[in-house]
Image (cartoon, grey):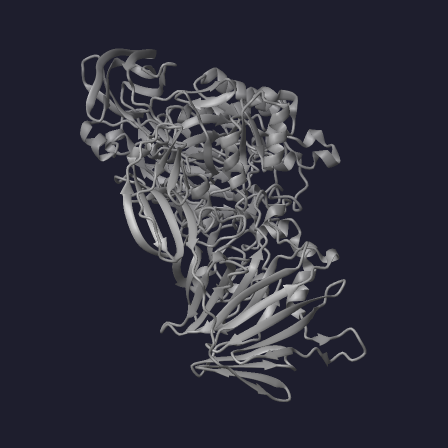
Amino acid sequence: MRTFNYENVKNPEYFCDGRAEAHSDHAYYASEADRETGCSLFQESLNGIWKFHYAKNYDAAVPGFEKDEYCCASWDDIRVPAHIQMEGYDAPQYANTQYPWEGREDIRPGEIPEHFNPVASYVKYFRVPERMKGKRLFISFQGAESGMAVWVNGTFVGYSEDTFTPSDFELTDYVREGENKLAVQVFKWTSGSWCEDQDFYRFSGLYRDVYLYTVPEVHIRDLRIRAVPDETLEKAELEICTRTWGSGKAKFVLSYHGEVCFEEEKELNGENVFTWEIDHPALWSAEKPNLYDLSITVTDASGTLMEIIPEKVGFRRFEMKDRIMTLNGKRIVFKGVNRHEFSSVSGRHVSEEELRKDLTIMKQNNINAVRTCHYPNSSLIYRLCDEYGLYLIDEANLESHGSWDTYPMDGDEDFIVPNDKPEWLAMMLDRVNSMYQRDKNHPSILIWSCGNESFGGKDIYEMSQFFRKEDPTRLVHYEGVFQDRRYNDTSDMESQMYTPVEKIKEFLAKDRSKPFICCEYTHAMGNSCGAMHKYTDLTDTEPLYQGGFIWDYIDQTIYKKDRYGNEFQAYGGDFNERPTDYNFSANGIVYGGDREPSPKMQEVKFNYQNITAEVTKDQVKVINKNLFLNTGVYECVVTAARNGKTVRELVMATDVEPLSEKVYDLPLPKETIPGEYTITVSFRLKENTIWAKAGHEVAFGQYVYAIREEKKACRRPVKVIRSKHNIGVRGESFEAIFSGPEGGLVSYRYAGKEMIKEIPKPNFWRAPVDNDQGNQMPKRYAQWKIASMYASHKDYRGDDLCKVLLPEVEAAEDSVKVTYTYLLPTNPVSECKMTYVVTGDGTVQVTLSYDPVKELGDMPEFGVMLKLDADYDHVTWYGLGPAETYADRKKGAKLGIYQNLVKDNLARYIVPQECGAKEEVRYAKVTDRSGRGMLFEMDEKSGPMMFSALPYTPHELENAKHPYELPQVHYTVVRAALGQMGIAGDDSWLSVTHPEYLLNADKKMEFTFRFRGI
């Protein structure tokens, strides 16, 4: 009789014991009625409440708890499936590259933590259902992190590692009549944990479904479906391989939209291979996820029904042709994301509702591909990707980043796993086999991946060879050969991470032996994804560059309460776990809490759209980048707006074949009325789909032009009131006071109400975004923060520290001009001027000017900041929107009139930072609920401005590490600016803003805008 020895948990060659062979994830039912309901009588869920004991290490676990006579009735209760860290035991721990035990235990591969290595002991008392008695009985653990030992009625059943694929055990010889005791011990860290160093929260426990199942006397245990068209795509071979327990017959029926393609009965015995030829197959792709229905009805020799297997079949041909990856004969471009399985509520246990929401949002935003970073996901997502139409890179459970990232510095090659080490090879082959066997029938999977960031070596090469041997219909991916080229053929494509576009071009200029993808790129941490368009534009001009996968899809954040009971999204370190990598857990293009898109998604959707509309005043060139869809499947809507308001909208027929382009004359009359005109060409769904309703926009293009009219200057008189210390200006319905001692505009009253709370001051700073922190922008540009905080109208350089630089005043009959000089405490000292021109209608024109000092270079922002009362919390703007925009992230925005609340502009980035900016603003109104407030307008010479209205200053945002640390709201902080440096995003630890998206400080800088009360 086998027994469990905990010492084996430390041995990389001990990773399964008594575990059943991996097999396909197909469902099977006892009757047609069961199949229709989706409820299998062959299965009995063990999800629910289990008895539980938590121990900090193995020595503290209850010895002998698995024995039949040991009563666990007094133990705690715990839910299954769930991570124990989400149920009040231990704590979630976020770590990136470093192993989670570093600094607490000094161990090497082949050793595991002993002082702190939580052990979760579970017990479930159950009875075998009557319908399952007398049959072979199994138990399936769909996911256990990271290793587990199983006992039934005190007898050791088996052991398994590999957190992310099912572990099945046969219980037939272990169960008894009446009550049975199932005992499971789950170890947080095992030898396999050295290969599970993914960039994610570290959890443990039984976190996926657990269920009993039985099989009929004749049972297809494993099913392999291959549906591959020939090169002509006119015929396809459907090959079905079965591995059957028992002997009998199977009736195979293939149908498409209810029409039967074939119906045939075959003998089943052991391993069988059956083939059929299908004429003119409807092909599967992300654009057209055509799926056939396959029904396999299994009977025994006497004709008695044993089981019914329903499956979906997708015919598609994915291959490398002339060094290009092609799908159904067409060059594919991956418009992808990396997606961790993650929920702010339940960790890596993600509900079907959450899964469907993720895929719906992906499809709505033109994402066509997912990399399952960096482990196999739950089985359901693969079926949903088949259905919704998303390409998958299915990635094996392997990342050993922390074992090799210091190798270039310390030369400790022996620390690297798995590398060439023979003792790790069997475990690695087991992991890829488990993934392959479970997932092999899903047409959505185009590429198998050997894992992530695990250096190189022979072991990973052997993993790739396993895939090639088992499945010649797909390609194999592994990025890590970039670090170790000894086994360069491990990967069928060149895959790199965060490589700048120019470096990609340089690489392909020298090496064109493989296509190139970015398995991770445009790092989406916080306010990011700047200049993403450079990558997507490259797919149009470089055939060997075939797209990339954004890092990543969802913020890894967890619901938590602050000390006052208010809920917030917690990131690394918020559970007092150490070591940790803090807010690096939040890199998503959707928020962690509600899975809703963040403002970055606006740009992603545009860059990933499959139709480009190049619009001019009279025409549109429609470039159809779809591989298989004609533009005629969409409704093309042409809209004309004048000064942001729609004046015409009509539908235009288009008929552009895939990978083709046509030019169409726009069916719009010639405009003659002065104003700014916006022509938008929009492509929208004609019919409802599983992921969006009819009318959903999939692509657009826009063009703006103006018919100029001469603007008349205001000639209303103003009265100037001069006193010892102040200059007052009064006109119809307004008053203004300019102070000498205070150095600025201290009062602006409109219709008797004071409108400003603080003196408008020059601003050169923004709250650093995560990318800024990574590229050291706060240190490189620190003088501009000081300049913004301490710009002074007092000359502090001489002996007289309080010498006031008095304003210059020029008065005319219908205007007053007041100019202030501010000294900036930079090194060397610099200065700027703010000039106010007040006219009789209450308009205040503000000009900020600065003669650049070469040593200081450019600045993060160049503009003016002022404060209004927080009652002015409604914003209407005519500019780019609806989401925030930046110099390097605004291609996905449309020019129009938009409205929101000031608080809506505070994007829910996990760490407060710069957000809410609006580019190319013509005017903006900031008002209270009654419509009273201020109007901010661009100056025609300066052109459209960057505008921002937030509840906080950049300095207040910068001082907070969590939203709950922000102060109570007292003001609406308005910033009007010439511009702001781009937010960058090639990565979040090194890459700076691209030079073309920096402010130009090579010549005099000047910015003018206007404001007045309304």
- Location of residue 1014 by image quarter: bottom left
Direction from residue 601 to residue 463 in the image, left or right: right
Task: Find the residue positioned furthest to the right.
Answer: 799
Rendering coords of residue 950 (x, y %): 49, 64
Q: As displayed, is residue 849 above or below residue 105?
A: below
Residue beneath the point at 64% across and 35% down: 403
> Which residue is nearer to you in this view: 355 or 826?
826
Rendering coords of residue 62 (x, y %): 50, 43
Q: How many marks?
A: 0
Q: As displayed, is residue 709 above or below residue 1014?
A: above
Q: As displayed, is residue 71 above or below residue 847?
A: above
Q: As displayed, is residue 459 above or below residue 825?
A: above
Regarding residue 294, the answer to whether it shows in the image is: yes
> Which residue is nearer to you in this view: 264 or 771?
771
Residue beneath the point at 53% across and 44% down: 202
Residue beneath the point at 37% across and 72% down: 931
> Which residue is nearer to you in this view: 155 or 435?
435
Residue beneath the point at 30% across and 43% down: 667
Task: Find the residue positioned furthest to the bottom.
Answer: 724
Rendering coords of residue 672 (x, y %): 35, 54
- Location of residue 722 by image quarter: bottom right
Regarding residue 454, the answer to whether it shows in the image is: no
> Which residue is nearer to you in this view: 441 or 768?
768
Rendering coords of residue 908 (x, y %): 47, 56
- Location of residue 514 by image quarter: top right
Direction from residue 964 to residue 740 in the image, left or right: right
